[in-house]
Amino acid sequence: MRNPDLLTQFNVPAWLTPDHLSGMQRGIEKESLRMQANGFLSQTDHPRALGSALTHPHITTDYSEALIELITPPFSHPQQALDFLRQLHVVVQQNLPEGETLWPLSMPCMLDKDENNIPLARYGASHLGQFKTLYRRGLGVRYGRRMQTIAGVHYNVSFPDQLFAAWQQHSSTPVDLQQLGLQDYRSERYFGLIRNFLRLAPLVVYLLGASPSVCACFLSGRQHNLQPLVSGTMYLPEATALRMGRLGYQNSAQRGLGIHYNNMQDYIRGIEQAIHTPYQAFSELGLDDQNGEPLQINDHVLQIENEYYSPIRPKQIPQSGETPAQALKKRGVAYIELRAVDINPYSDIGIDLTSACFLEVVALYALLQDSPAIDDREQDCIDHNLIKVVDQGRKVNLSLTTPEGEYLFKPWARQQLEHMQAIAKLMDQGMQQPVYQAALQVMGKRLEHVEQTLSAQVLSDTVTAGGSWRFGHALASRYASQQVEQQLQPEQQQYFSQIAEQSWQAQAQLEQQQQGDFKTYLAPYRQNHAVLATSPKEHV
C-alpha cells in the first residue's frame, strides 16, 4: 500500500482571502417521491395548487408524475437555501392529496409489480410539454422505469468572478491560462474542480451515502448481489449509497464515450457526438410504438444532454432556444452541480446545514488543488473506486486504486479532511460563524466511527423498524405532521400562490402560441450526424 502522504500535497494560496469568496452562491434541487398511505407510489396527478410542473420555477416533477422536484434560487448563505427548501416542503405537503406524504429516502417506496404503473410526468399539450414526457418515456424504454424512481439531492455552487480574476493575476498561474479571457479562465478552473471532485467522490459517498438498503420490490426482474436484511428489504452489509452504484443511474452505452472533463471543448464535443450518434441497442427498441406514437426522442446514445449521467456537471443557464451545451459554449461555466448526494432521511427536507457546508468545502478544496488531466487508466480507477465505496464503503481496511497502485481509504480520507481544515477556517471567516469547521468535525467523527455514518444508522434503524418501508413511512408521517402544522409568513404564502397561478398562465400561453404538429417539432431531434454504432466503444 502507498503512503497517503505521497498522494496529495495542498496549501491554501497565500493570496486568497475571505473577500475573494464574497458573492459565492449556492442552490439546492431535491427530489421526493409522493407516497400513498398504503406505502405505494402515488397514482394521482401533480397537485394543481402547486402550479404547472412545466413552467413553475421552484416546484416541478422529474421522471414521474409522482416524483416532485423542488428547486431553490441561489443564495449567499447555505442556511438561506435550506430555509427556502423547507418553505417549499411546507407548500407541497399542505397541498398533497389526503393521506399522501413525501418519501424520505433515495431508494423508492413500494412499487407495483407492473412498472408501467409508474406514471410518466405530464406537462400539458404544448410541444415542449410533450417533448419532456417523451424523453421520460424513452428513459423508461431504455433503462426501465424502476431505475428512474430513485431520488437524490443536487447541490449547486458558484464562485464569484473576483476569485478567478485574482487567481489569474497571481504569479504562479500558468502562462497559457494567463492569456485567457476571464470567462474561459473560469471555465478551465471549474473543469479542474470537476476532475478533482471525481477523485474525491469516494469520500463524499462514504460520508453522505444513505442508501445501503432497498425495498425488494425495486429489484424485480433485475440481477443483483444484495442479501436479505429483514422481510421485504435487501441490502449489502458494508454498502453506503446503492443509488450511486450498479442499481442506480447507469447507462452502458455511455461508458465508452471517453468524456473525462479535461477541457470544456472536448466535453461539449463528446456530448454533442453522443446526441447525434445512433446506438444499435436503442435502434432495436424502435422509435415509435405499433400505433405510430413516439417511444423515444431518437435512437441515439443520448436522447438529449441531460441523459448523460455523472456525479457532477458543469452548468450554465440556457437562454431561450439554447441547449445546455450551447449555453456552455457561449458563456462558459456558471456553476457546478454536485449530484453524488443521497437524501438524508434524518432531515425533514433531505439535507442539513452540516452536509451543505461540507459540500461547499469540498467544492472549494477541489477547485484550488492541482488538477491534472484524467486519462483512460485513471478514469477506470475512478469508476472502480466509486463502485467499491458504494458496495463496501464501511469495510475495515478498504483500499482504493490509482494508476500507480493501491492505498488504504481511511488514511487517504483522513488526509483530505485535514487538508480541508484551512479551507473551512477561511470560509468561516467570511461567514463570521464556524459552520464549515463544525461540518468537518462531524465528518471526521463519521470517518473514525463507522457506526456514525448515515448508511450505518439507516441499516440499524431499518432493522429496528422491521424493514425499509416501515422505517421510511414512520419518518414520512412525522415530517408530514410537522409541515402541515407549520405556518408560512403571509408574504411567503402570497408569493407561492401567485407564482403557481402565473405558471399556469405561462403554460397556457405556450399551448396557444405553438404552430404545427408535434412530429414536425420532433423531426430535427431525430436527425443523424454520425455513423451507426454497434457498441459503446465506437464512441470514443
Image (spheres, rainbow, N blue to C red):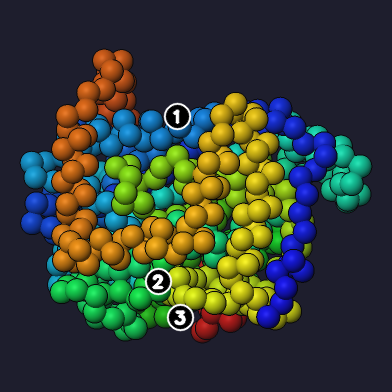
Q: Quadrant of the N terminus?
A: bottom right
Q: Badge 2: how crowded within 10 Å, few (<14), some, or many (20+)?
A: many
Q: Which mark is residue 239?
A: 2
Sequence-wise first label, 2 or 1 = 1
Sequence-wise first label, 2 or 3 = 2
- Residue bearing mark 3: 280
Residue 338 against residue 54 in the figure, above or below: below
- Residue bearing mark 1: 80
Q: Quadrant of the C terminus?
A: bottom right
Instruction: For the residues labelled 2 and 1, say whether their Cβ atoms are less than 8 Å apart.
Output: no
Residue reaching furthest to the top: 490
Closer to viewer: mark 2 or mark 1: 2
Cα–Cα span, label 2 and label 3: 34 Å
State the residue at coordinates (32%, 49%): 346
Of 343 and 25, nearer the camera is 343
Instruction: For the residues labelled 1 and 3, say whether their Cβ atoms are less than 8 Å apart.
Output: no
Sequence-wise first label, 1 or 3 = 1
State the residue at coordinates (21%, 56%): 472
Q: Badge 3: how crowded within 10 Å, few (<14), some, or many (20+)?
A: some
State the residue at coordinates (70%, 31%): 18
Residue type, numbered disc 3: Gln
Cα–Cα span, label 2 and label 1: 32 Å
**Percent position (x, y) of residue 481?**
16, 38
Cα–Cα span, label 1 and label 3: 47 Å
**Percent position (x, y) of residue 95?**
17, 34
Instruction: For the residues labelled 2 and 3, say whether their Cβ atoms are less than 8 Å apart.
Output: no
Q: Which quadrant holds residue 461?
A: bottom left
State the residue at coordinates (45%, 32%): 79
Closer to viewer: mark 2 or mark 3: 2
